[in-house]
Amino acid sequence: MSAHDPAVADFRSETYPEFTGDISDNYVEGYVPNSLSAPHSSLNTTSMWVGMGLLMGTLPPAGIIVWALGVMVEPAGLQSAQQHQTLLWIGVVATIIVAIVAIVLMWTGRKGLREFRARTGRKD
């Protein structure tokens, strides 16, 4: 077959259609665009995924807090009370820093969705 045969489908244009104008102009009334393929989807941004990973990353420093509080209540081993206090503060500071960075990254990752909502007036 020839490369210019009209019977052969154009795979690229059928798989990745190019929309003219704004994509939201083509939405059906009442459609809530929340799919992964939507251009304003938060799930397409690296900062959103890194932020969610860091939010899960708050668990180890929170575990340090729990461990330090537990050892302060029931002392065990040869560590002094000062070492437990230091570990407690390390856990508190690390948890707060990682949580703030995670929240900021997730907030910036949702920038496209906020712009879409402001442009279209959607509340959902």
Image (cartoon, grey):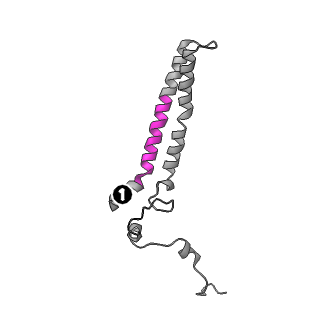
Above or below — where is 63 with respect to 50?
above
Position in image of residue 45 (x %, y %): 49, 53
Position of the C terminus, as image quadrant, is bottom left
Q: Residue at x 56, y 26 (%)?
A: 64
Task: Check disc 1 and report its element: helix, strand or loop.
Answer: helix
Q: Residue at x 54, y 25 (%)?
A: 66
Q: Position of residue 17 (x, y in %)?
A: 50, 73
Q: Main secondary structure of the magenta part?
A: helix
Quadrant in which the N terminus appears: bottom right
Tell me: residue 124, above or below residue 91: below
Provide residue 92's location: percent of width, then percent of height.
48, 27
Near-viewer residue (103 or 1): 103
In reply to whether residue 102 is colored magenta, the answer given is yes
The residue carrying pointer 1 sits among few (fewer than 14), some (14 to 19) or many (20 or more) residues within 10 Å by Cα, namely: some
Residue 80, located in which quarter of the rendered image? Answer: top right
Tell whether 114 sits left or right of 2.
left
Residue that carries the numbered disc 1 in the rendered image: 117
Check if residue 67 falls in the magenta segment. no
In the displayed structure image, the side of residue 114 where residue 44 appears, left or right: right
Residue depicted at x 61% and y 87%: 5
What stretch of residues is rendered in magenta? 93-112
Q: As drawn, is 122 to the left or to the right of 55?
A: left
Q: Quadrant of residue 12?
A: bottom right
* Residue farthest toward the right in the current orientation of the protein: 1
Position of 123 with respect to 88 (left or right) is left
Residue 119 in percent (x, y) is at 33, 60
Find the residue positioned furthest to the front.
30
| Residue at image point 54% right, 39% down | 56
Q: Which residue type carries mark 1?
A: Arg
Q: Nearer the viewer, residue 4 or 82?
A: 82
